[in-house]
Image: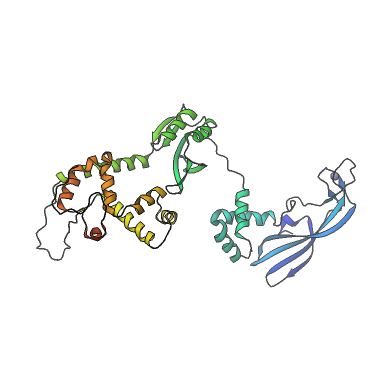
Amino acid sequence: MELFPYLSALLIEEVERRPDKVVLRTRVRAASGSCRCGQSSARVHGRYVRKLRDVAVGGLGVVIELRIRRFRCENTACTAVTFAEQIVGLTTPHSRQTPLLRGVLTRIGLALAGRAGARLASAVGITVGKDTLLRLVRALPEPEVGEVEVLGVDDFAFRKGRHYGTVLIDMATHRPLHLYEGREGEDLAAWLRDHPEVQVICRDRSSGYAEGARIGAPQAEQVADRYHLWANLGQAVEKTVNAHRSRLAEPPSEPADTPDEPQVVQLPTELKIVTRLREQHAADHELWQQGMSKAGIGRKLGLHQATVRKLVNAPSADDLVAKSLQRAHVVDPYVGYLHRRWNDGVSNPGRFAGRRGGGKMGPRPSGTPMHL
Ligand SMILES: [Zn+2]
């Protein structure tokens, strides 16, 4: 009993060691039981055996067989005619594990979730299904959010391009506080109204969160978070450098008098957007020719349905390039560069030469000037 203080209310009548487990046959020491109405009773109505699983001992799982009595309730005002005895600290109605085992399984579930958790449990002598582990984790009470002074808010993809959610983070502890479906500012405002202590909100530059933060926490200062500042700066630099590429001098080529050192080869660079269009078009058409559905292609390549349709319908990658060139606002910064590349004949790769037809740009002898 000193080894198992949580079994002190029980009399262990027999211990049986089987090849795969240890079985403890027990009954309750007390002479009477208490009904949920508070009345105690010693009038036994019947008995049955209940089984509880416990943590492993010596590498073997433990099963506690409890000989449970059902008592008659003698309180005439009580709606229960009979009641089964419960052992404080050991059983609750319908439980099939001891609190100790339940605690161990919950920790395993938190660390490894379903499948991996079930594998680890089996290695330490506990047979448990993945669904049981997940159920234990879900049954845990939500941790207290507490006071949040600096709140981070950002979106995340359940499925890229399709389905988004929002995560709120305590920037002091980097602990996630709350998740919700969608990216609506109204939902952010609702959470903020319950947290008037928030002083600073770090967010991306979307207008939804800005509006939600303004309505829900007018007292808080809004700042752009470091990630988005770096990302936006990177994009701006890339755009600017691309716009001025044609004016950048090529680095002077080194004299080839050091044969041991590898030579730096200057490869022609294509605009990122054009490269990506070509790659997507090729991948998309390959899958389409294999008979995959547009929805299937979208899932496989992580593209929106409308993008897949656009790619499938374009007979050649050059059609797509032409279309994106028509979107003047996107291309404006690159006009000088594109013009130069076009006149160099770069946008006419041999790979697609045989598959043209009906394209807006059409075949074009190298050297024909393009007017944008
Ligand atoms: Zn009662």
Splitting the image into four quadrants, where does ligand 1 fall? top right
| Residue 76 horizontal/vertical position (percent) | 90, 42
Residue for point 69% across, 60% down: 54
User: Total of numbered circles in the picture?
Assistant: 0
| Residue 303 horizontal/vertical position (percent) | 40, 51
| Residue 338 horizontal/vertical position (percent) | 20, 46
Against 22, is 209 above or below?
above
Position of 209 compared to 36: left or right? Answer: left
Position of 96 compared to 244: left or right? Answer: right
Snapshot colouring = rainbow
Question: Which residue is the extreme one toward the bottom?
Answer: 19
Look at the image and tell me whether residue 272 can be seen: no
Residue for point 22% across, 57% down: 349
Question: Which residue is the extreme one toward the top?
Answer: 219
Quadrant including the C terminus: top left
Residue in front for this viewpoint, 13 or 164: 164
Residue in front for this viewpoint, 147 or 57: 147
Residue in front for this viewpoint, 367 or 116: 367
Look at the image and tell me whether residue 315 can be seen: yes
Against 237, is 266 above or below?
below
